[in-house]
Image (cartoon, rainbow, N blue to C red):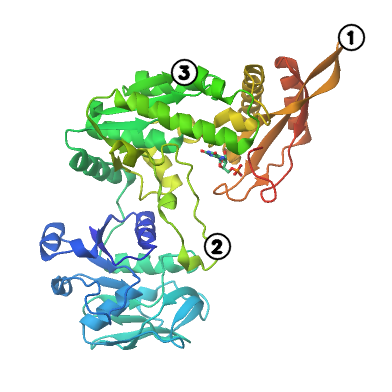
Amino acid sequence: TLLIVDFGSQVTQLIARRLRELSVYCEIHPYQNVTEALLETLKPKAVIFSGGPDSVMREGSPRPPKAIYELGVPILGICYGQQVMMHDLGGKVEAGEHATAEFGRAYVAPSDTKSELLTGWFLGEREQVWMSHGDHVSEIAPGFEVLGTSPGAPFAITADRDRGFYAVQFHPEVHHTPNGKTLYENFVRLAGFSGDWTMEAYREQAIQQIRDKVGDKRVICALSGGVDSSVAAALIHEAVGDQLTCVFVDHGLLRLNEAQEVVGMFRDHMNLQVIHAQEQELFLGKLEGVSDPETKRKIIGGLFIDVFQKYADGIEGAEFLAQGTLYPDVIESVSFSGGPSVTIKSHHNVGGLPEKMGLKLVEPLRELFKDEVRALGRELGLPDSFIGRHPFPGPGLAIRCPGEISREKLEILRKADAVYIDQIRKHGLYDEIWQAFVAILPVRTVGVMGDGRTYDYACALRAVTSVDGMTADYYPFSHDFLGETATRIINEVKGINRVTYDVTSKPPGTIEWE
Ligand code: XMP
């Protein structure tokens, strides 16, 4: 185990992410819990001190137990972690004054290129790093030497090779330290890790944690069929079996065959207890005559909570609510980026419910990024076709039917969407595209089919590439593909006689039409 002592940095999880990329097993423990007893049980092979917002100069600021320095294992201190090390081991830290505080991009140059910690790192003369500190080390502890400096940090990289203690002033785990991973790679190699840890191991560990937390209590989960809630449900089911009950809310705004596919897979294929809440009438009824997008969202969100609560109330003794919260949902603001927050706000359909119902949360994916969730899903035996599915919004087809919703339009939309997705799959483009769907437009246009005049709906095809949905570009289909797809939709879907392709990027557009 590699122990990460968390001193409260916003990016501690990123350290874990970098280590997992190197196939090294690590555990993050908040500094308060890092006691001698924990060190005794964990027997870490190496330790990393995270950054943190506090000042070591402050009485009572976060510290590790002194015994950690006596374990005889390598330690890497980052930012606040460096200051803690220097302070504890006899160096000096000075309180931040404006002139010495450093925030943002800086460049470190090596003073010792031969250090094993820096192998492969300095490809040029200097490396870009990300600094974010108020206080700074003014005198390194006995036994330490300087491996690298930046204009603002004479002790940017320091090492006590005999003891295997390393300390850096910047954050090698963030994106703005582009080659920071090399530093972690060197550190774990120095610590003797062979990098053979896998997602299978993560699964075992997560299952154990869920069992410890849940005990013999019941867990409920709002299953949407999306990747996150699916993987969370599969994992929790593996941990506590039938103590988990899933509720799949069918609001009548799902894609063609979607409810059957999701319920069929989880109930019949994977043996989960799934309640199929058939509430189409309720949702569609309340949406009648509503055309404003935000009003639609509010109605759907509110009903979703009511419905979920109604079914959950019928589940005897539920104490936990499972959620597929991912790490990007957890980072509230990435202050290190300096710019606007990059947080992706998840549209949690059951927001506020845990408090209202007195439920405790189980969020077994909190430490994972999307690609890791997919890897875990595969590990749990979910089919690839499920794991690679495009995102689908909570309000479903309601926001793909601009203006007033009607059953007729939804029916047409479902069919057109199914043809479009079938085309995309047939042409092998599904995985290249981040999200694709059809929107049915609130206009009828004139057409001619055979000898007759038609007066039917127009639709718009949408397909985008994106990394996180925050920005997006339209997908450059070939004209042949577009022509063929338009022909198929018009021939196969009664009610549509005109097909358009949406070539708007985001910004200025959004991905959905509403
Ligand atoms: P926009 O349209 O904002 O969409 O560019 C970005 C991503 O978010 C999804 N989306 C939603 N998901 N509830 C959801 O659960 C919503 O109200 C909602 N609105 C948009 C959208 O499908 C895309 O993936």
**Which circle, 2 or 1, is nearer the viewer?**
2
Q: CA distance from mark 2 to mark 3?
A: 41 Å
Extreme residue toward the top, this view: 451
Mark 2 vs mark 3: in front: 2
Q: CA distance from mark 1 to mark 3?
A: 39 Å
Q: Residue at x 31, y 31 (%)?
A: 220
Q: Quadrant of residue 421?
A: top right
For label 3, count other residues whose C-alpha is less than 10 Å away and answer few (under 14), some (14-19) or many (20+): few
* Foreground residue among 358 and 266: 358
- Name the foreground residue: 7 vs 480: 7
Q: In the rendered image, which residue does mark 1 sit on?
A: 451
Residue at mark 2: 340
Percent x, y of residue 112: 39, 84
From the viewer's perspective, is 256 left or right of 49?
right
- Residue type at mark 1 is Asp
Estimate how packed mark 1 is, as few (under 14), some (14 to 19) or many (20 or more) residues with alpha carbons within 10 Å: few
Does the image show residue 225? no
Say if mark 1 contacts mark 3, CB within 8 Å.
Answer: no
In terms of secondary structure, where does tag 1 sit?
loop
| CB atoms of marks 2 and 3 within 8 Å | no
Q: Residue 105: x and y, percent?
A: 51, 75
